[in-house]
Image (cartoon, rainbow, N blue to C red):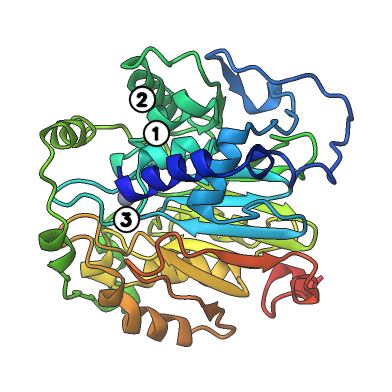
Amino acid sequence: MTLPLRFAAALACATLALSACDGGRNNQQLTPRDGAAARYTPSGQRVPLQDWQPIPRRAVSPETQLARDTILGPNAIEDGKVKLWWFGVSSFVISGGGHLWLMDAWEPIGLQADYVPVGREEIAAIQPEAIFIGHGHFDHAADAGYIAGRSGAVVVGSEEICTSVQADAAQDDLQNAFDCLITGTATLPAPGTTQTVELWNDMAAVSILQHIHSAASPQTYELGDTPFIHVPNLLPYLGYLNSSPEEWLRFLSTLTLEQGGTWAYHFKLGDFTLLWHDSTGPIVASDPDGAAVQAALDSFPGCVDVQLGAIVGFDQPISGLRDPRLYVEHAHPRVFLPNHHDAWAPVVGGGAAAYKSEWQREMDSLENPPLVDYLTDPVDYMAPRVYDIKDPIWAEPMPGSRCAGE
Ligand SMILES: [Zn+2]
């Protein structure tokens, strides 16, 4: 999409000396655990979590390094730092431990286009090594096939998600250019189950939690939750109208993508931990699956320092922001950043400002509220968040969490 960035990339490549395009310079000080690991070559396979062989870090070409420098800024991958860039809805670029990966993969498009300053072309150009998919709906996964097909990124998700992603990539005959790391199916393992996988051979295992997709749950009226009706901001749609017939066709073709379960991912880098989820189901304690998810949220290794969580959902007109609040209440993060609250679809995507004060009110009601780093569209798109994993604060257990109780 966004032409200025593409031109900037081409221009920079043309004007910079080769040394400046030299990729991999951020990677040399880090050593994979098993040293001379074989090169990883994807081939269109589906690999269950238990059969996955941890892969080595990938060499970065000068072109990729330049794209990263241009799109993410210099030193996108930095030793001892975790960085994240939001590119709409629940999609993030994340770097850490010498790697670069995505959470979800969708260039927000529909009535609007180019509201987010990067598109699927730029995200493919930075060559992510993996794409962790929270669930298969279009606003989370519609560009995973496009990006994985052009980057070889491992697609982490369920069987159903992999089927959709491969089918999308097959349109460009790129279905064998990447592998799927299979987390399960729409129903297996049961919500509340956490699995782990060592995706890379030089990084701690990633924890993968099957949880519950957002849903209206009228039976929870009795809990005293109050509805919340936001006032949507329509200006982003009118100001960024999608005038491309091809983009309209592509968008319409993605609307029926299967959900394929609901997956949260937890990363641990030293004492720093990061939890990401792109949906928030009605995890009330009276529901056995809800209770299991509540317990799982407080059982990750090292607990949760930074939580990136969806704060919108289908329960909002019934119980307000109770469901996303429950995810925070049980994960006990030190810092919380919202997602899925931007202007991504008219009315349902109200724009971040529409939820801000209500969300802060929910957080203030918690016994140990996190610091809220409230992402706002469009100013926070691609505005990096940087965490120093050696900051002693991450070693301190968050009050109320399981880690504080041990
Ligand atoms: Zn969604």
Q: Amino acid at mark 1?
A: Gly
In the image, taking residue 24 as reference, residue 332 lies left or right, namely left
Residue for point 70% across, 76% down: 398
Instruction: Report the Cα–Cα distance between label 2 and label 1.
Output: 10 Å
> In the rendered view of the protein, which quadrant contains the N terminus?
top left
- Residue nearest the viewer, comparing 54 with 66: 66
Residue for point 53% across, 21% down: 178
Q: Amino acid at mark 2?
A: Ser
**Cβ atoms at labels 2 and 1 below 8 Å apart:** yes
Residue for point 39% across, 66% down: 323
Rendering coords of residue 271 (x, y %): 78, 63
Residue 164 is tagged as 2
Q: Is residue 311 visible?
A: yes
In the image, taking residue 1 as reference, residue 309 lies left or right, namely right
Q: Nearer the viewer, mark 1 or mark 3?
A: 3
Residue 116 is tagged as 3
Res 258 → quadrant:
top left
Regarding mark 2 in the picture, which secondary structure is present there? Answer: helix
Residue pointed to by mark 1: 260
Instruction: Report the Cα–Cα distance between label 2 and label 3.
Output: 24 Å
Rendering coords of residue 373 (x, y %): 50, 76
> Crowding at label 2, few (<14), some or many (≥20) Cα neighbours within 10 Å?
many
User: Compared to 158, does 371 lie above or below?
Assistant: below
Q: Nearer the viewer, mark 2 or mark 1?
A: 2
**Cβ atoms at labels 1 and 3 below 8 Å apart:** no
